[in-house]
C-alpha cells in the first residue's frame, strides 16, 4: 500500500483534487452531477486526451513538441482535400490518410532533432511556425465546410433517456480515444520498445551504452505523437463538422500543461497514461464546472491557470511531507 | 572438489594482455603494457589520472583498438583486439563511475534491463524481470525491494544495483571504475563485502580506486601504471599505502605529523554545546588561529551537518558560536561568508563548482563584490584576482576562460579553494577535500592547507579517511552518532590506535 502511494503520488494527488472539485460542483450546480454531463465531458475531452497520450510519449523520451496541434490542423486540411479528390472514402480510409500524414509530420521533427542535433523545443517551435504559416498561406484562412457525409454524421454508441427527457450519449470520439489510450498504455508499459523509450528519456547515455538505437527512439516518439495528432485532427473535424485552419492553434499549450500536470516530467523518463488522462480531465472538469456555474468565459483561463498551479505544487510536494506517517519505513542502508 | 577445480583454473589467467600500445594525437597513452587477471581474483589497477587506466579498460572492453602487435588472450581465445560485442558476449562488464542506471525505473527493471534490449519489439515479461533481478541480488547476498523506483535508494545501493546488473550479463570479469568515490566508510565496507561475495562466486573483479586503504584491503594483487607504462604487478600482502603512492607517482612523500606550537595563538572559533536534534548533540570545540582541526567519523556521524551549521546553512537548536571574539548567529550562509567563514563542500562536482563555466568565473563567484568597479564587474580586477590565486595555489590551467570541467580533480579542487580564499575568510572548513583527487595531487592540496594555516587561517578539515586527518591536522576530533566522542593528538597517538577507535 505504501509502495503504491509512493509510486503513484501524482495520480493520487490529482484524484484528490478532482474529487474535491467534483464534490464542490455537485453542490454548487444542479446539472454537474448527472450522467448527461459526465458523458458530455468525455465527448468534449476526447480530442485532448488523444493529443495528450501522444505528447506523453515524447515527454517520456525526453523531448517536447510544440507543433503537434498545428500539425493536426495541417492533417485535417490535407485529409479533407484528399477525401474530396478520391470522392468520399470512409472512416478507415480517413484514418489511414490522417494517420500517415501525422506520422510524416512527426518524423520531420524527429529528423531535425536527431539529424541536426537541434534541441526539441527549438526544432518544434520552428516547425510550429512553418506548419501554421504554410497552412494559412495556402488556404488563405478559408475553412472547409463541405466534408463527406460519413465524417459529419454523429455516431452514437450508447444512449439513455434521462428523467428530464434529455439524452445522455456517448459518441464515436470516446471510442477512438479509448483505443488510442489503450494502444499507448500497452506500447509504453508492455513492450520492450516502450521500456527503451523510458530508459532513453531517463538516462540517454545509459541507454546508449546498452546499445539502444537513439535515432529510432526519436522517430518512434515523434512518429507516435504524429499518429495521435493525425487521428485527433480527424476526430476534431468530425466533432466540429468543419475544418477551420486555426481551430487547433493554441491547443498545444493546454495539452502540454495537462500532461505535465499528470506527472510527466519535462526532461524525460517519467509519466503515466493514467496521470495524463487525469490531467486533461481536471482541466475539462474545471472548465465545465465554471460554465455550469455561469462564470464569465473571460475568467476561465485565469481560474484554470490557478488550478494547474495549485495542483502542480501539490503533486511536487512529496507525498511524505503531506502525509508524514508514510515515511516510517526507510530503506535499510 | 570444488576447491581443486578453482585452483586448477587459477593457474591459467582469465585475461592476459601483452604489448599493448595506444597513441592519441602523437601522445603515447599506453606503452608496451602487459596486464593479467586470474579467474575469480580481485585485482587492483592503480595509477594517477592520465596514467592510462581508463585507456587500458577501453582496450579490454573493445572501445579502442590497440596498435598492431598486441595480443589479448581472454577465456581461452586469442584476439588482436576486442570489439564491444565480443567483450560483452565473453562476459566482460564495466561498472562506470556514473553507473548508467535509470533512476525512474524500478530496481528490477534496472537490473534486468538486458531482457528488454533487442532489435524488434516484444512484450515485456515483468515476472521474468523480477526473478532475474532477485536472483542476481541473491548471488550478491543482498535483499532490496525490487519493485521500488531506483531514485528512492541511496547511492551505495544504486552501486549494488549496477553490480547486480553486470551479473545478469553473465559476467566473468567486472571492471569497477572508482566505485567508492562517493561512498562513506561504512557504505564502502558494505560494497567491499559484496565484491568479496562476487569474487567467491568465481567472478574476477578489477578495481580502480584512488583510495589506497581499500585497495590494500580488497585486492590480492595490484598492477601499477605510470605515464602509460607498466610499473609492475605486486601482491598486496606486505604493501603499504605509502609504498603504492611512491610506485604511482615515482616520488617519495614525507609522511610526518604536524608539530606546531599553537598554545599562544588566539582562539578563532569557539563552539559550545551546539545541538541540532537528530543530527548532532552538544558539540563543543575550539580552533585557534593557524590551527588545523581534523574531524573524522563514520556515515551519519553528523560531520557535514555540523559544518553546514557553522556555515549558516542550518540553524542550531541550542548552543553558542563565537568567531574571532564575537558571538555570532547566522541567518544564512551569506551572513557566514560576510563574517569570514568559508565552506568547501564535499561534493565538488555538483555543489562546489559550476562545471560548464569558465575557471575565472568559478573563482570569483563567492567574492563578486570585491571586483566591482562602479557597480559593474571589472574584467581587469577579475583578471588580476584570478591570476594571483592561480599563481599562489599553483593551479595548472590552459586559459582562464576554459571550462572548469577541462581540469583534473586536483586542479579543480585548487580552484574551489581559491574561490573561498578570495572571500578573505578567517575560518576555512574543508569537507572531504580529496574525494576524487589523485594521491600525488592530494599532497599538493595539503601543502596549500598547511601554508594557509601558517598564514593565520583557522581550518577545520573533515574527512572519513583517518590517515588524512592524522597527517594533516594538529588535533583530531572523533565524531560518532552526532557527538564528539574522542580527541586525538597525532604524534601522541599512533595512527593505528586512531583507526581502530574510528572504524571500530
Image: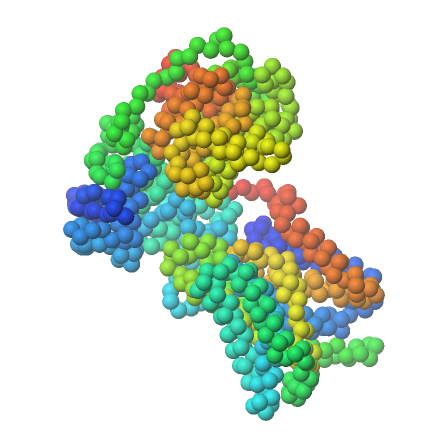
Q: On the picture, is B313 further left or further right than A162?
A: left
Q: Quadrant of residue B401?
A: top left
Residue drawn at (25%, 36%), measured in percent from left and top? B226
Say how the picture is coloured: rainbow
Q: Classify the position of the N terminus of chain B by image quarter.
A: top left
Percent position of residue B450, x then y: 42, 20
Q: Nearer the viewer, residue B209 or B27?
A: B27
Residue drawn at (37%, 29%), measured in percent from left and top? B442
Residue extending farthest bottom: A87
Residue drawn at (61%, 79%), measured in percent from left and top? A138
Percent position of residue B45, x then y: 28, 39
Q: On the picture, is B489 further left or further right than A36?
A: left
- Figure check: A106 above or below A14: below
Residue drawn at (70%, 52%), measured in percent from left and top? A310
Say whether residue B225 is visible: yes
- Figure check: A20 above or below B50: below
Percent position of residue A276, x then y: 61, 62
Number of marks present in the image shown: 0
Q: Nearer the viewer, residue B134 or A48?
A: A48
Percent position of residue A301, x then y: 74, 61
Say whether residue B92 is visible: no
- Figure check: B497 above or below B14: above
- Figure check: B216 above or below B484: below
Q: Quadrant of residue B194?
A: top left
Q: Classify the position of the C terminus of chain B by image quarter.
A: top left
Amino acid at each position: 500500500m505504501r509502495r503504491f502511494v509512493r509510486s503513484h503520488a501524482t495520480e493520487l494527488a490529482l484524484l484528490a483534487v478532482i474529487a474535491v472539485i467534483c464534490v464542490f460542483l455537485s453542490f454548487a450546480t444542479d446539472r454537474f452531477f448527472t450522467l448527461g454531463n459526465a458523458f458530455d465531458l468525455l465527448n468534449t475531452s476526447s480530442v485532448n486526451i488523444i493529443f495528450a497520450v501522444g505528447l506523453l510519449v515524447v515527454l517520456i523520451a525526453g523531448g517536447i513538441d510544440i507543433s503537434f496541434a498545428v500539425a493536426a490542423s495541417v492533417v485535417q486540411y490535407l485529409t479533407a482535400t484528399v477525401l474530396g479528390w478520391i470522392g468520399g472514402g470512409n472512416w478507415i480510409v480517413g484514418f489511414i490518410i490522417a494517420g500517415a500524414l501525422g506520422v510524416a509530420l512527426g518524423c520531420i521533427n524527429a529528423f531535425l532533432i536527431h539529424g541536426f542535433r537541434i534541441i526539441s523545443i527549438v526544432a518544434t517551435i520552428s516547425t510550429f511556425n512553418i506548419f501554421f504559416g504554410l497552412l494559412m498561406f495556402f488556404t488563405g484562412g478559408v475553412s472547409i465546410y463541405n466534408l463527406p457525409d460519413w465524417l459529419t454524421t454523429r455516431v452514437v454508441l450508447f444512449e439513455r433517456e434521462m428523467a428530464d427527457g434529455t439524452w445522455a450519449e456517448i459518441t464515436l470520439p470516446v471510442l477512438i480515444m479509448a483505443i488510442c489510450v489503450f494502444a499507448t498504455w500497452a506500447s509504453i508499459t508492455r513492450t520492450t520498445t516502450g521500456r527503451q523509450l523510458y530508459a532513453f528519456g531517463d538516462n540517454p547515455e545509459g541507454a546508449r551504452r546498452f546499445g539502444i538505437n537513439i535515432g529510432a527512439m526519436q522517430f518512434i516518439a515523434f512518429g507516435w505523437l504524429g499518429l495521435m495528432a493525425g487521428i485527433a485532427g480527424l476526430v476534431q473535424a468530425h466533432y466540429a463538422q468543419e475544418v477551420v485552419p486555426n481551430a487547433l492553434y493554441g491547443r498545444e499549450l493546454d495539452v502540454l500543461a495537462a500532461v505535465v500536470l499528470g506527472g510527466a516530467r519535462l526532461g524525460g523518463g517519467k509519466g503515466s497514461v493514467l496521470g495524463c488522462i487525469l490531467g486533461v480531465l481536471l482541466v475539462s472538469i474545471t472548465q465545465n464546472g465554471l460554465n455550469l456555474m455561469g462564470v464569465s468565459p473571460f475568467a476561465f483561463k485565469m481560474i484554470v491557470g490557478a488550478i494547474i498551479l495549485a495542483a502542480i505544487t501539490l503533486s511536487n510536494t512529496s507525498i511524505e511531507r503531506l502525509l508524514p506517517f508514510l515515511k516510517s519505513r526507510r530503506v535499510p542502508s | 572438489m570444488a576447491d581443486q577445480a578453482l585452483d586448477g583454473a587459477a593457474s591459467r589467467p582469465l585475461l592476459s594482455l601483452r604489448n599493448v600500445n595506444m597513441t592519441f594525437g602523437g601522445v603515447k597513452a599506453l606503452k608496451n603494457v602487459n596486464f593479467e587477471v586470474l579467474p575469480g581474483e580481485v585485482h587492483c589497477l592503480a595509477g594517477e589520472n592520465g596514467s592510462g587506466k581508463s585507456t587500458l579498460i577501453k582496450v579490454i572492453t573493445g572501445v579502442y583498438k590497440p596498435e598492431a602487435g598486441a595480443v589479448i588472450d581472454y577465456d581461452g581465445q586469442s584476439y588482436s583486439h576486442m570489439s564491444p560485442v565480443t567483450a560483452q558476449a565473453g562476459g566482460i562488464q564495466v561498472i562506470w563511475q556514473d553507473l548508467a542506471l535509470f533512476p525512474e525505473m524500478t530496481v528490477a527493471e534496472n537490473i534486468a534491463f538486458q531482457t528488454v534490449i533487442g532489435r524488434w519489439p516484444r512484450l515485456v515479461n515483468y515476472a521474468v524481470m523480477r526473478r532475474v533481478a532477485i536472483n542476481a541480488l541473491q548471488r550478491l547476498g543482498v535483499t532490496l525491494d525490487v519493485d521500488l523506483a531506483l531514485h528512492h535508494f541511496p547511492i551505495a545501493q544504486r552501486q549494488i544495483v549496477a553490480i547486480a546488473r553486470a551479473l545478469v550479463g553473465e559476467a566473468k570479469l567486472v571492471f569497477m571504475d572508482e566505485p567508492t568515490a562517493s561512498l562513506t566508510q561504512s557504505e564502502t565496507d558494505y560494497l567491499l563485502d559484496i565484491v568479496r561475495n562476487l569474487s567467491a562466486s568465481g567472478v574476477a573483479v578489477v578495481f580502480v580506486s584512488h583510495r589506497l586503504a581499500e585497495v590494500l584491503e580488497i585486492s590480492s594483487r595490484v598492477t601499477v601504471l605510470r605515464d602509460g607504462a607498466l610499473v609492475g604487478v605486486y601482491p598486496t600482502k606486505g604493501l603499504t599505502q605509502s609504498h603504492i603512492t611512491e610506485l604511482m607517482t615515482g616520488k617519495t612523500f614525507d609522511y610526518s605529523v604536524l608539530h606546531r606550537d599553537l598554545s599562544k595563538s588566539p582562539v578563532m572559533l569557539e563552539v559550545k554545546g551546539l545541538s541540532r536534534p537528530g543530527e548532532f548533540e552538544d558539540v563543543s570545540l575550539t580552533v585557534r588561529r593557524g590551527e588545523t582541526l581534523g574531524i573524522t567519523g563514520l556515515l551519519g556521524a553528523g560531520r557535514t551537518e555540523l559544518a553546514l551549521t557553522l556555515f549558516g546553512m542550518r540553524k542550531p537548536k541550542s548552543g553558542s558560536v563565537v568567531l574571532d571574539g564575537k558571538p555570532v548567529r547566522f541567518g544564512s550562509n551569506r551572513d557566514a561568508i560576510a563574517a569570514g567563514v568559508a565552506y568547501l563542500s564535499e561534493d565538488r562536482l555538483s555543489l562546489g563548482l559550476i562545471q560548464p563555466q569558465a575557471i575565472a568565473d568559478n573563482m570569483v563567484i563567492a567574492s563578486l563584490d570585491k571586483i566591482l568597479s562602479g557597480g559593474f564587474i571589472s574584467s581587469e580586477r577579475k583578471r588580476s584576482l584570478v591570476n594571483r590565486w592561480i599563481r599562489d595555489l599553483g593551479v595548472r590551467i590552459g586559459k582562464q576562460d576554459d571550462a572548469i570541467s577541462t581540469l583534473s580533480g586536483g586542479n579543480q579542487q585548487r580552484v574551489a579553494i581559491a574561490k573561498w580564499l578570495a572571500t578573505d575568510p578567517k575560518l576555512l572548513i574543508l569537507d572531504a577535500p580529496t574525494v576524487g583527487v589523485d594521491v600525488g595531487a592530494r599532497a599538493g592540496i595539503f601543502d596549500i592547507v598547511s601554508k594557509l594555516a601558517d598564514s593565520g587561517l583557522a581550518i577545520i578539515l573533515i574527512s572519513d579517511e583517518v590517515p588524512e586527518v592524522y597527517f594533516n591536522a594538529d588535533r583530531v576530533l572523533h565524531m560518532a552518532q552526532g557527538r564528539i566522542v574522542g580527541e586525538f593528538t597525532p604524534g601522541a597517538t599512533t595512527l593505528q590506535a586512531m583507526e581502530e577507535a574510528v572504524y571500530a
